[in-house]
Image (spheres, coloured by chain):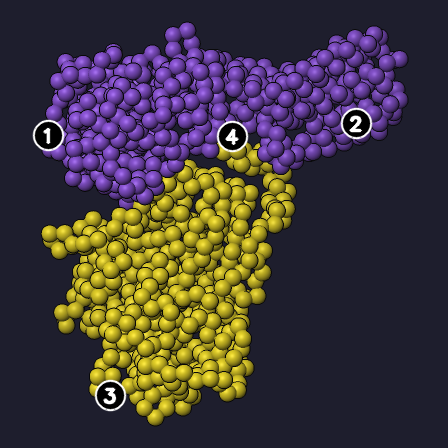
Chain colours: A yellow, B purple
Amino acid sequence: MQRRNFIQQVAALTGTGFLLSQCQTTGQHKIPGRIVGASAKVGHLLRDKKIQGAPQSTTQAEVVIVGAGVSGLSAARHLYKQGVQDFLVLDLEAHAGGNAAAGENNVSRYPWGAHYVPIPNNDLKDYLSFLQECNVVTGYNSEGLPVYNEYHLCFDPEERLYINGSWQEGLVPRNGVPAEDLKQVQRFLDHMHQLRYAEGQDGKDAFAIPVNHSSADEQYTKLDGITMKEWLLQQGYTSEYLHWYCNYCCRDDFGTRYDETAAWAGIHYFAARKGKGANAEHQDVLTWPQGNGWLVEQLQKDYRDKIKLNSLVTSIRPTGGGVEVLYMNVATGQLQAVHAKQCVVAIPQFVAQRMLAPELNRQQLVQQFSYAPWMVANITVQELKERRGEALSWDNVLYNSESLGYVVATHQSIKQREPVKVLTYYLPLTQGDVVTARREAAAMQHEQWVDIILNDLRKVHENIAAAVTNIDVMVWGHGMIRPVKGFIHSDARRLLNKSINDTIFFAHTDLAGISIFEEGFYQGLQAAESVLKARMSG
Amino acid sequence: MQLLLLLAVFVIATCGLIYELVAGTLASYLLGDSVTQFSTIIGVYLFSMGVGSFLSRYFNRNLLRWFIQIELLVGLIGGFSAMLLFIVFPLSASFRIVLYVLVFLTGAGVGLEIPILMRILKDKVEFKELVSRVFTFDYIGALLASLLFPLLLVPYLGLMRTSLFFGMLNIAVGLFLAIKFSREIKRPGVLRAMAIFLILAELVAFVLSNRILSYSETLVYNDRVVFATSSPYQRIVLTRNKKETRLFLNGNLQFSSADEYRYHEALVHPGLQAVRSPKQVLVLGGGDGLAIREILKYSSVDSITLVDLDAAMTKLFTSNSMLVSLNQGSLLDSRVHVINGDAFSWLRDNRRQFDFVVVDFPDPSNFSIGKLYSNTFYKLLYQALKPEGIAVVQSTSPYVAPRSFWCIDETIRSVGFHTAPYHNLVPSFGEWGYILAMKDSVYHAPTVYVPGLRFINVATAQQMFVFPQDMRTTKPLAVNKLNNQALVDYFEEEWSTYLE
């Protein structure tokens, strides 16, 4: 038993619990830190049509890529590898990476968004060769299975869940869970295992990565028409623990509650991962202190000089035989033009439509795209007091919490002792409708986020308020695409993915319907392929 | 006078409750089951207050003097209660008796005080007023105590100093009253002297509370603690009795001077003697310099690199005369190069190759240390070894933890090493295990050993490589990897069953 326990018990016994709790929330020392990142203010200049005037100068490039997220960087990488050297990548932010952005303080690097990738499916050859290029795959064994670099495979202990008064290993609820529920959970997991290797009539995997490689067999695609929750109930899954777990997974991967997420997407989370390595299985993950920021660094390492940051694209206009892209230097406010033969638009569609001429009629379709707001915090902490059970793991989740818990950025350290750690805390804002949630999130102050975080984590680390030395917060207004009921198999996705005049191509995970690294990687790769094809024929 | 006495009630009530909270918290710390501890302590406390109230009828004269005397007594017992309990706990099974006696005495004292006080004041204040005021102050004092205790006292002072602090306060009130009312009591000088003496005694204890805590540590360690320090990594405690010196890290025995030679000779010589003309040696862990003492017996060795995490350890073993005589000043030898750093990180950056490597880490009892027994670590070890070189890995007890021992063997072999496991008896530890790791497939047992060894010779060394059935396992073993930490699970399972 820990000291704070006694204090609480003493407080309870002496009837001062109420006063004590008041002191904890209002009387704590002010936690340093700030709200950082995702330049909403600058972005809104575009939304509010506040940028006008003529470009001050014009340059030329073969290809312009708008957006330096995973899709844009992957497109650029592929072009570079195929010998196209004259391209330019533009991004609004001060750092490349998009959703996989990362930060750094004097303790560690840390992610601001996506923080891991699962072991890739073995049929993703391009992706695997990228991983081999950056030494994540160190080679192949005699059976042809990739050997993963063990510094990058997530170290044990990997996951723990705080449930019914103690930490258990893994995130599937087991501790204190009644036998009947455990049976249902096991039936569900077996069910997912079976769907993992299921094929449709067309011979394709029922659930594949990229999403577009999945079977079109109606027995599976019809799952897009109901929510994950509806599907669970249809299948006789009633356990509240299992429902929590599925809701957790949907919120974790899609920032969307399971009563909104399409069952097809919800199942895809479990069933699409079938990778196998010489030293890893499909449930294993690769991770780095800065999360997928590490992969982003690898994606851009050959052509860093061709990325122009702090550049807000304001217009993308087809011209005779090419495209004109206007962009504003965020620091100086100067407008510039670049004329190119082709353009890859690697940004979310709700932004892209504002840059493209209204006569292209994209607005109507974009209405069907919905994005999840998130709050991510990086918390610098000294030694934490622990509750009973499993030791501090990479991923630490609290049952029935509004948050997804936290990931330890310093987990992959080989050092014996890391007295100061950075925890990356994830909170998808899934209460109520997204528009309201987004607006409310934008209005929140740093102290309010800090209160939310500390009140959540205090349940598992009594001394959290005293142990924290800094909390930086990032609010993602449009964190990722939401694969709600009907979206993935809608026409909107397909129609908006079509190129314009073979000069403007689109690549983004919102066009896949699922925001995962592989989708971004292949979206970019395919757009780059299309560019190359257009060049050949042009 | 009235107000002063009422303020005294206030302080008494605060102190009384603090003693009770200290006792409850301490009992919960040491015995667990805080609900039981708190409820029995509160019960005993309230009951003994009742006893005190009952006994108050037998006090008929010199009430003010009695009042002050009780005040001093409560201050004495309450003040020293936490310290006494800390010291008594490791000593005896009768800890609970001492605990409840202390609670009873303070409770009875506090229970005596209120009725006596009311009687002192009964002629000066109307009864209705008196009851109202005395109990008001009493209960406000209780509230103050219950707020101060969790918010300020425990976090900032700790239990021992909290009780001493309130003991002094309690006595100070007595002293103050003795001075203020010196004309109304007999022989006030005696009371005053007693109070001052008690305050001083508690003050000394307050200042020395850390040292007293280490005395209590002595009791935990059985022997006299001759040195204790806390580094950022561990608590280092050295104990001494007539026969031997023992080193404990975080309470775990590292060696006893009586038989450490058995461990260190076995760790070093079977491997090092088998290397032809060893020059470059690496020691990972082992900041005590005892393995290095053995290594220095080889005249061909011209460089020993020691990588130990904890500067406090290497410093202790180069400066403490008793320890320097134990390791024969090995860490001061000009051939020894000490690096205080993380072994894994150091080895990852290292480009040198060595003739002989000693891997002497603590047992893999947690995920952090478990990394130092992973295949990834042994791959680095492989790179750091010359083709003809040999490494030796301390590998816990194959008798207590055969799965752990053979898991380490399996893991070492998984990276391409050939191994030669062996074991010997170190009375302080029990049967202990080591594994030689070589790039060469055959271990050529030495036919002669350096002179001056007390345990190892050709015959004993030969026996060490024989494993009886009770040091083997038939259960399947996984390779210990960073992403499965299989060894930590085996280790925990085997040692916890053994220690039960």
Q: Residue B459 location in percent, x, y?
A: 14, 13
Q: Amino acid at mark 1?
A: Val
Question: Tag 1, which chain?
Answer: B
User: As drawn, is A484 to the left or to the right of B182?
Assistant: left
Residue sitting nearer the eye, B440 or A65: B440
CB of mark 4 within 8 Å of CB of mark 2? no
Q: Which residue is mark 1?
A: B442
> Please, what is the three-letter code of the amino acid marked with disc 3?
Gly
Q: Mark 4 — residue?
A: B35
Same chain, marks 1 and 4?
yes
User: Both on one chain, marks 2 and 3?
Assistant: no
Quadrant of the drawing holding the C terminus of chain B: top left
Alpha carbons under labels 1 and 2: distance apart = 85 Å
Q: Secondary structure at mark 2?
A: helix
Q: Is residue A524 above or below residue A166?
A: below
Q: Which residue is mark 3?
A: A538
Residue drawn at x 30%, y 88% is: A501
